[in-house]
Image (cartoon, rainbow, N blue to C red):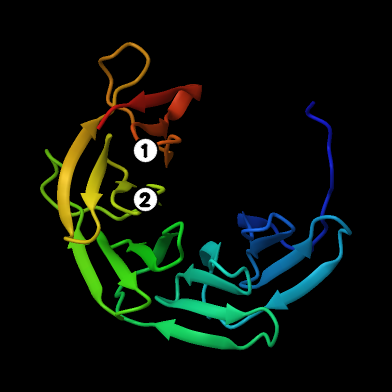
Amino acid sequence: TGRLVRELGGKAAKVDVCFDPSGRRLAAALQDQSIEVWDVDSGALVSRLRGHGGSIRAIEFDATGEIVVSSATDLQVAATDLGTGRRRWVYPGHTANVHCLARSPDGSRLVTGDWDGIVKVWDFETEDVRAFVITPKGSFRRLWAEHACLRLDGARLVTSTIWPSTQIWDPAAGRLVAEIALVGRNGLVPARPLCVAWLRGGRCVAAGLPYGWLAVQDP
């Protein structure tokens, strides 16, 4: 219907938002380096989390909905317990701003991407880490990872950079499976993806393009 259901307050601008698995709580990353967690039904502020020493770029709930994972320009990826407000763990290893973050639907793996073009896949159960570098075709250097999204089954990962293409990966092997070139409305001008997502069923990838266009492609 387009009806406004709830407006949630706050003093600073929001840079990312996500729902918990139940859809009852909404987390928002703020420009003041904090995270707010809201009860959607009541509109009450449940928790305010701090700990990053740089701007937060992305947030995700874990599979239980009790932990918020965040990435930031302080090179950290951290998991914070909503009940205690304390950090469960901090993943080091990135050498540049961690710009994008995505988790597998079952919560067993986490994907992070930084401005050095390094994408890492973290396995919570085995503590295994796989890293690979994004160097799009036609580019003479690696480019920073701007967006990442895991397919529902966790078997494929789509990433995007400032280059006019999306990359499809096998996250378990850290292997590039395909690269999809993107063009604008007239089919001639290369278009940089502004966001990426898998369509239901995982058969196609959707990429938001400049000038209001949405590209849906079969990888």
Give residue 38's mark. none
List the residue tagged with mark 1. 202
Residue 205 in the figure: left or right of residue 175:
right
Nearer to us in this view, 146 or 175: 175
- Please state, as top left, top right, bottom left or bottom right, where the N terminus lies in the image: top right
Locate residue 77, reporting x and y percent: 44, 75
Which numbered disc, 1 or 2, marks the residue that appears first in the sequence? 2
Total numbered labels placed on residues in the image = 2
The residue that appears at 31% across and 81% down in the rendered structure is 127
| Amino acid type, label 1 | Gly
Judge left or right: residue 37 versus residue 114: right
Q: Where is residue 165 in the image (x, y as percent from the top left)?
A: 26, 36
Identify which residue is drawn at 72% across, 67% down.
37
Q: Which amino acid does label 2 sit on?
A: Asp
- According to the picture, the residue beneath numbered tag 2 turns out to be 153
| Residue 69 left/right relative to 33 | left
Q: How far apart are marks 1 and 2 (CA)?
A: 8 Å
Query: Residue drawn at (21%, 67%), measured in percent from left and top?
Result: 131
Describe the element under mark 1 as helix, strand or loop: loop
